[in-house]
Every structure is written in C-alpha cells, then in structure tokens.
Image (tube, helix red, strand yellow):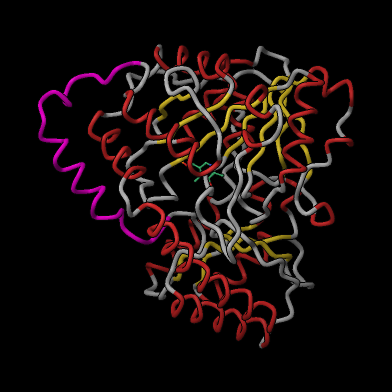
Amino acid sequence: MNVQPADRIRKLPRYLFAEIDKKVRAALDKGVDVIKLGIGDPDQPTPGYIIEKMMEEVQKPRNHSYPPDEGLTEFKQAVADYYKTRHGVDLDPQKEVCVLLGSKEGIAHISACFVNPGDVNLVPDPGYPVYSIGTMFAGGEVYRMPLLAENNFLPDLAAIDLAVADKAKLMFLNYPNNPTGADAPLEFFTEAAAFAAKHNVIICHDQAYSEIAYDGYKPISLLEAPGGKDVCIEFGSLSKTFNMTGWRIGYAVGCAEVVEVLTRYKTNIDSGTFRAIQYAGVEAFTNGEMASFSEKMSNMYQERRDVVVAALREMGFTIRVPKATFYVWAPIPEGFASSTEFVSFILEETGVVITPGRGFGEHGEGYFRIALTVDAKRMQEAMDRISQALSSR
Ligand SMILES: *Cc1c(COP(=O)(O)O)cnc(C)c1O
C-alpha cells in the first residue's frame, strides 16, 4: 500500500521541539537529573472535591450513554453563572455557551466553521500554534500580527493592512498570553471589538489563563468590553484553572450566531463530552472552594515566578514580570545565534528544559520561555544551574 497523507498533513510545520525532545531523551538515558520547564502542564493534582464528584457520577448508568449533542444544561449554566459573578457578563446558557473537548479542540475547529479556502485569519506571532494550524487545515491564509515588547506584546491593530482587515474572517487573541505572559487592558479589548465590528471579523479570544494571576491582578474577559459580545467568541478551559489538562473539557461563549455554528459543526464530528466529566466540571465551578483554590494556585505560581524573575535579573536578563499565566518570557543572552541554540546549550550544560521562542512563530525568535511547573525549591535549583553554566561559558 502506498500511504499518502493529504496536503494539509504534509504542510504541517516542522515540529520545532523534535530536536530538543531527542536531546531530553538522550539526557534521561544518561541518567541526568532533568528539570522540565518546557511544557505548560500543571504539576499539581485536580482538587479532591472534583475527583469525588467524578467518582460518584461515573457509577451512574444514565451517564454512560451519549451525552446531549448541545452539551449538558447544568454545565452550561455553571459557565454562565461563573461569567456573571466573575466578569459581570450575562450569557444565555442555551444559546451563548458551547461545551468543548478542551479549548484546543474548539480553537482548532473554529476555522473550519468560518474560513473558506483563500480566506485570511489574523494570528498573533508569537502564539499558540493551534491558531495557524486550524487556519491552514481549513485552507485559509495566516496573516501574522507581531507581538512586540515595545507594544507590551499587544498587536498593533492600526498596522494591519486595510485590504487584509476587510478580507479577514477571524482574529485570534490570547490574554493573559502564552508564551509572553502579557495581559491586555480593557482599552485594548475595546479597540479590538471596534476593529472587529468595522471590518466584520470574528474575534476568537483564547482565555486559557483567566484564573492564574498575581499581585492582585484579575484577568478580564473580552466580553466585558463594549460591543465585545457582538463580535467575539471566547474560549475557556478547566485545564489550567483546575489542574484538569487530562480530563479534556472546555467551553466557548459569546456571540450566539458564532456559538451556534461551532455547536452545529461539532455535532457532526464528535458526540460531546462524557456526562460524568461535565458534572465534575459543574462541581469545579460551583464548589464553594473555587475562589480559594484559584488563589492558592496563583500564590504557588507567584512564589515560583519570584524565584525565576529574581534569579534571571541577577544573571543580567531583562525581565518583564508577568501579572498572569505560569510563564516567564525573556530575551536570550548575547552570544547565541538563535533561541534553539540557547535552549540546546542550557539543556546540554544543565539538564534544564526550556522552550525556544521560535517554536511560537518567527517573532518569538530571540526569546525563551520558562514554565513555572516545578516547586520553588526545584525552580531555584534550575536557576542555580543556569547561572553557573552562563558564568562559566
Ligand atoms: C493550554 C492552552 C490551551 C488548551 O487548553 P485545553 O483546554 O487543555 O485544550 C489553549 N490555549 C492556550 C494558550 C494554552 O496555553
């Protein structure tokens, strides 16, 4: 048999982390004490009350059948209630909430819902790779919006080519931002909503880090901006908020017409999220411990962030202190030709795994990302090793 993948598979970008993954495996084989600060996956377990709810629900035979296509009413209501209390935004749970198999799934599929071959999507660079891959799978073209330090890693909407803006179907945004750790003020969301209305572009706002924030900062929803709900679908996730990356549950909320199309698309592709997981999701949002759990997690990451920021500054790095997300984003030191070269050097010399900025797009070149996913003591150990490697270079 002559197996020939479709062009969309062949055109997938080269996996930039493959070479680093190979080096990590080699280091582990050699018995190196590897510290993994690469992948953004929480190191803490899902809270016990969510697990208990899951154990209870998984035993009920009525939960073993196909879930409702349009998602469980109780889960959608819980998301709507969370938006009301957390953001002051009213959502109709039946029309303005869609249940996802993790937010990545919805983000990957939204292009197929709206993009015809040759259409354009506006995509932040650096950014989560799924925005451009989803666009490409739908036959669309990616127009990159550079996220630059001098603009606080917000795209310069005025710099977007007017012909492109008028042609564009979707604009992806992500605040608090992965990988830069940047946050967006309400003024920016207001400006983005006006831009979207003017150019008839749907904003797809990825809010995976809505509850991981520091120094009293509370991330805002794009739906809080005037006109936001008319132009935006916002993607949320239980993954990072409740340490549930493996459970695969998320949601999309906002503009009813957009939510309806995504729901209709998904009805034809998957058959929904396991009912027991949706009930566990209800528990996640409605349990009285939600606020204190988020605070506990944020405090934990903040301690780690402070270790990293202090250590990197000591080493002479220019660091912006992230107010949210569990990432620190920093320029590579002089003397390295690329982010990949720097990351390989650090891995080989110290056994510490970090991510090259280039993996998030061409404007990520010259930067590296540290994920705050080990405890503060281990984080300090990683920083000590890096400091030593750089000073004896
Ligand atoms: C982790 C992450 C997601 C995906 O979350 P899931 O809900 O687990 O699919 C989406 N966007 C960004 C920016 C992320 O970092």
For the image, the number of numbered tags is 0
In this rendering, the answer to whether 363 lies above or below 101 is below
Q: Which residues are magenta?
A: 42-69
Residue 283: % across, % down: 29, 42
Residue 81: % across, % down: 43, 35
Q: Residue at x 38, y 46 (%)?
A: 245
Residue 303: % across, % down: 51, 74
Q: Is residue 140 left or right of residue 378?
A: right
Residue 284: % across, % down: 33, 45
**Near-viewer residue (238 or 4):** 238
**Which quadrant of the rendered structure holds the C terminus?**
bottom right
Q: Residue at x 79, y 56 (%)?
A: 149
Q: Is residue 359 left or right of residue 347?
A: right
In this rendering, the answer to whether 22 lies above or below 201 is below
Q: Residue at x 32, y 39 (%)?
A: 281
Q: Is residue 274 left or right of residue 166?
A: left
Please tell me in which quadrant of the rendered image residue 71 appears: top left
Q: Residue at x 31, y 58 (%)?
A: 45
**Which quadrant of the rendered structure holds the N terminus?**
top left
Q: Is residue 47 magenta?
A: yes
Q: Is residue 210 magenta?
A: no
**Near-viewer residue (371 or 87):** 87
